[in-house]
Image: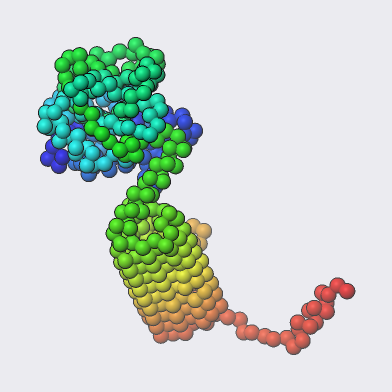
Amino acid sequence: MKNHSFTAIVLAAGQGTRMKSSTPKVLHLLGHLPLIHHVDCLLEASNCQNRILVTAPSMESVREHFPQYHHAIQENPLGTGHAVRAAEPFIKDNEDVVILYGDVPFVAKDTLQAMMEEKASNAADIILLSMMPEDPGAYGRLIIDDEGFVERIVEYKDATEEEKEIPFCNSGILLTKGSLLKNLLKKISNKNAKKEYYLTDIIGIATQEGFKTLALDGAEEELMGVNSPEDLALAEALFQGYCRQKFLDQGVRFLDPDTTYFAYDTEIAEDVTIEPNVFCGPGVQIKKGAHVRAFSYLEGCTIGENTVVGPFARIRPGTVLEKNTRVGNFVELKNSTIGEGSKVPHLSYVGDATLGRKVNVGAGTITCNYDGYQKHKTTIGDNVFIGSNTSLIAPITIGDNAMVGAGSTLTQDVAKDSLALSRKEQSNIENGAQKFRAKHRKD
């Protein structure tokens, strides 16, 4: 397909009322990526240059995701055939045209490749993806002739009881020449139960005019559409399963694979260990030999080689953990670089900071990076020791080999090799505890 020019029409004008959401259906997230972007990734991988998006007039929020597309507006919701008609001004006669759906996210590049190859072999004029779902439900049924070609498609609501027993179902995805598609679209009518223009009617019209339609079998999971929250949940489970298997094949070890969540762009190297209940949001890269412990939440971060994270760590966007670092329980990092061999073992917040090599950050340490108006940076050099319960008021720089005493609140830079302390001198009141209790005791 790399050298084969083709046009893709992505239908996305459906209102998605069953989603019961103000968000357009095709913008609901699957693996942290909108459904329709999964379709766009397919077209990008297939090197499709001419992309047409069909939306309803009110769907500007969808259109703005795809400025590189030609945009066709379906003014009235009069069926899939009517939607494809809206795309006609952008259809090239001499190119193959594939029709896809913004709510069908799992179509594989290999499947599209197979359709192209079948079309190129002149086996048929129209290539249709079909499936045999366990529950055919309300899918349109394929009527196959004696030669094995699709004679027509009958919509479920228009089918006879005998036709409803046919196991071969229509996915809606098809491939044909642009000139033929435009010719057939002109001839469909709305004489059916819903008074709509069905795209499926072009198959019967093509047969009458001597054109051949061939159905290629596709997997039900690959061709599933998302029309409801239940469908979206099922799709998410499938997506997570695909990711899980991919990483297992790459040599990632999961203590409980079913409890790990991935985003569409999660990258995990071999020889990584991931404990139960780990969440990977967008932009996570985990390098070789790392160990992510239970109940850790990662997003927009890089976990370096042989680094240990968690348990119960939150690593936020913009964070880079260089190799051999240690981030422990109840630590939150944000937009920070933690240098090689450094440790933030527990109960700390480090934000908008750069830590050098072999830094040790004591429990309860925080970088005070926000003054109510702006974020400020903390810079910590190599081999620095930060005592427990320290507050670093940014902007601040701690020089190489410096030490900060526990319980300090620092507002000024610390020079290299220096020891910084910020404590009020301790005073002990003799018998003070006894006197305090006596004063407050209620006999």
Q: Is residue 358 above or below residue 395?
A: below
In the shown orientation, is residue 22 left or right of residue 142?
Answer: right
Residue 282 spot, x, y in % from top left: 37, 53
Q: Is residue 246 above or below residue 218?
A: below
Q: Residue at x 42, y 41 (%)?
A: 234
Residue 259 spot, x, y in % from top left: 45, 55
**Residue 49 in sight from this viewpoint:** no
Q: Is residue 78 above or below residue 238?
A: above
Q: Which picture quadrant has residue 430?
A: bottom right
Residue 248 spot, x, y in % from top left: 33, 58
Q: Residue at x 20, y 27 (%)?
A: 214
**Residue 305 in sight from this viewpoint:** yes
Residue furthest out toward the right:
443
Residue 106 spot, x, y in % from top left: 32, 40
Q: Nearer the viewer, residue 46 or 157?
A: 157
In the shown orientation, is residue 239 left or right of residue 206?
Answer: right
Q: How is the image coloured?
A: rainbow
Q: Which picture quadrant has residue 29?
A: top left
